[in-house]
Image: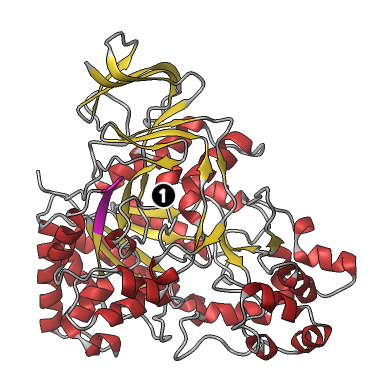
Amino acid sequence: MLDWLIKNGTVVDGTGAAPRVTDVGVRAGRIVAVGHISEPAHHTMDATGLWVTPGFVDIHTHYDGQATWDACFTPSIYHGVTTLVMGNCGVGFAPKRPGHENDLIQLMEGVEDIPGAALHEGIRWNWESFPQYMDALAATPRSLDYLVQVPHDPLRMYVMGDRALAHEIATPDDIRAMTVLLRESLQAGAAGFSTGRSDNHRTSEGKDTPAANATADELRALAQAFEGLGHGVIQIVSDYNLLQGPAEFDAEFDYVELLAQASGKPVSLTWLQRDPGGEQYLKIQARVEAAVKAGLPLYLQTAVRGIGVLNGLEASFHPFMGFPSYKEVAHLPLAQRAEALRDPTRKACILSEKSERLAGDGSAIPPLVDILLAKIDLISGRMFALQDTLNYEPTVMQSFLVHAKQAGISPLEAMYDYLSAGDGAGLIYFPLFNYNEGSLDTVRRMLDHPRALSSLSDAGAHVGTVCDASFTTFMLTHWVRDRAKDPIALETAVEMLTRRNAQYLGLTDRGVIAPGMRADLNAIDPVKLSVGVPELIRDLPAGGKRFVQRAQGYVATWVAGEQVQAQGVVTEARPGRLVRMGQG
């Protein structure tokens, strides 16, 4: 007898094959039949009119801290994800020296915009080594499956202590010690290794991340820790010294190729159209294509829409946060603050001022923020009032630039009036990256690249500025169902969200609907499927706030044959586990 029989669904099997109407049978956590099925089942779902897909695989999340208090991985569970990967960008919480927990919190707070107070209160520090961290996580039943990568920064801090925070060059002994620890972690089932080399990644004290300037010798030795292992991936984020000028690009990209050459493992890198530096993504593409042609296993982690920042008086960023007269009222509760901002005298004062410098020593704010604030009127053509009906591909005609011209005021005043209206809860959507031409046409071309991996949700991070855990849902709504220009075929989109990411990780038991595969599945109503408006809620430990974006249209999600989500409501089932790679 089957556990589940899903009848008459439009099965999009994850292979890229055309959808077909058929049945799926599930028993003991596995798919046992696909086709016309007459065997009885404990549970039967009529999936007529629904898409039935494999569960989605999110390879770029930052639940490293949240996982210690949240068994459900919200909000990813609302968006069809059944397997996710933590430990990206070189940041995380293991290994760690007892008594040095705050160093790791400051790192994560600065780089990934996760409130330090929430991390202090929420994390249970019952580990020291990375394998112990894995054991601590594995002790809690979960809704979803997850994998962990060893992050470079904590590894360096564990071995080098204060010398890592001072950005000293690792000695040969340091490098040997890091390599031994990485190897032990990989043998214990860690999925891979991640490192970060971005100028915009800072600790909460405004310092470079500890591994940002690691030498070629250090990176080569760490990559060689994979030797002889049958599993493992490497993830790297870098802006290739963009703020230092284009001449530095090739020398920095050489580190990407070094990691692939020394490890022999798949290496994925962040792929964005940046601003400034809008043509850099083409140079990245050219280097990747040349490297792949030479036999290196490089992949491009690619977003499905603009990397957009939500600006608001209660968000982590907004255009007036650096203005002296705003700072005078910044401490007030939101509604009172909005009222104070509506005072004509204060408004005139703020609009006559210039933003003070926000980045630098003692500040986690990246230098890019100061650059953008200095040209706020110019970029206002890419800043939009967030409406009840979400539009992630707005035109310049909907921007504050155009509204300001129509009203005969400056763009900054238009934003001021919008943010100070009512109770002050208005939000501004600013697609910071991937939107230089005022559309998602560049993203469409990037997604079409054969080395593209649908990625970069950053789920669990940047909680006061974004909520891109909804990338999976956006892929199916915007690119498959709604966009008239250059849509993506349903079967192609699902393959990118499922099998392609699973294969990159070396997961051979999921990502496809076929007999013998894990029963990680979604049943989706394509008519009702939608991405909800981001809400700023206070549900983190210590009352911390974060943007959460739910979805409609996910009728059911199964993990290993157990239903973990029904019509947007998380069930009590906890079949999820830590996936230990290379463990047989």
Magenta segment: 142-148
Task: Examine the image and state in which quarter residue 138 appears.
Answer: bottom left
Circle 1 is placed at which residue position?
76
Quadrant showing the N terminus:
top left
Q: Residue 114 versus residue 188: which sits nearer the camera?
A: 114
Element carrying mark 1: helix
Q: Position of residue 102 (x, y in %)?
A: 29, 81
Q: Residue at x 11, y 57 (%)?
A: 188
Q: Is residue 450 visible?
A: no
Q: Residue at x 62, y 81 (%)?
A: 332
* Residue 145 counted in the magenta span: yes
Query: Is residue 529 placed above or below 316 in the rendered structure?
Result: above
The reply, left or right, for residue 290 in relation to residue 392 is: left
Q: Residues within 10 Å of mark 1 (few under 14, many from 20)?
A: many
**Amino acid type at mark 1:** Ser
Position of residue 408 measured from the top left corner of the image (x, y, whole percent): 90, 71
Task: Give x and y (percent) for residue 53.
Answer: 40, 31
- Measured as percent of width and height from the top left, residue 561 is found at 27, 31
Q: Is residue 479 left or right of residue 303?
A: right
Q: Residue 104, can we see it?
A: yes
* Numbered circles on residues, count: 1
Residue visible at 12% across and 54% down in the picture: 229
Q: Is residue 79 magenta?
A: no
Q: Residue at x 24, y 42 (%)?
A: 507
